Amino acid sequence: MATDDWRIRIELPDEEGARGVLERLGLARRDADELADELREHRLAVSHDDDTVFVYAASGVQAEQASRIIEQELQDAGWTPTRFVTERWLAEEERWDDDAAQPDIEEDLLQRGYAPWEVRVECKTAAEARDLADELRAEGYGVSRTYTYVFAGTETREDATALATRIHGEVEPGGELVYEVQPQNPFAVFGGLGT
C-alpha cells in the first residue's frame, strides 16, 4: 500500500497552549477511545514550533482520524486554535498544499533582474574579451566583462549550454553575486547579468 505524507497544523494563541496540546496527545488519557488506540498503533509523529503543533500521518485516512481525536482533545481542554488545517505534502513542488507556491528559482532571479545561468569565457587578450562582449551584447545577452573574462547571462541552463558550445565557454549558475577564483588571481564580479 502506497503512503503519502500528510500533517495536521494546529496553531494556538500561545506557546503554552501548544505544550498543553502535546502533553494531552502524549498522555492519551482516553485509552478506551478506539480511534486513539488505532492512531497510537500507527505511531504518528508529533512536533511543535513555538505556538504550532504538527501531527504527521502516512495517509489521508490517518490524518482524518487524528484530526477527530485532536479536535476532541482541544474541546475537552477548552482550547480554541487560531488555525486547524490538514495539509498534504506536494513532493514535486516540495511544499505543503496549504502553503503558498514559491516561484521557481530561475523565475525569481529573472524577476529581480539577474540571469539564473551564465556562460564564462576566458579570452586570450583584453581586446578579444571586449570584442566578444560587444558581439554578445549585440545579440541581446546581458554581459559583464572583467579584463579577459566575459560573462553572458541566460534565462535557462539549456540556453547557457547552447551558447557555451558556440563560444567555447563554461556554464555556471548565475545570480546576484558570482565568485570566480583562479589560482593566484582571485576576483569577484558583483551585480546582475540580466538578459
Image (cartoon, helix red, strand yellow):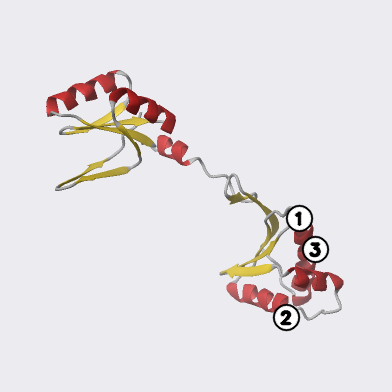
Q: CA distance from mark 1 to mark 3?
A: 9 Å
Q: Is residue 167 above or below residue 65?
A: above
In the picture of the structure, the residue carrying the numbered disc 3 is 65
Please give the name of the residue rendered at 13% of the width and 24% of the height, measured from the top-left corner.
Answer: 127
The amino acid sitting under disc 2 is Leu
Residue 32 at what x, y percent from top left? 86, 78
Decide if residue 115 is in sight here: no
Please give the name of the residue rendered at 66% of the width and 68% of the height, measured from the top-left corner.
Answer: 45
The amino acid sitting under disc 1 is Gly
Please give the name of the residue rendered at 43% of the width and 29% of the height, measured from the top-left corner.
Answer: 158
Question: Quick check: marks 2 and 3 in contact, CB under 8 Å?
Answer: no
Residue 21 at what x, y percent from top left? 68, 74
The amino acid sitting under disc 3 is Gln
Quarter in which the C terminus is drawn: top left
Quarter in which the N terminus is drawn: bottom right
In the picture of the structure, the residue carrying the numbered disc 1 is 60
Q: CA distance from mark 2 to mark 3?
A: 17 Å
Q: Is residue 20 left or right of residue 133?
A: right
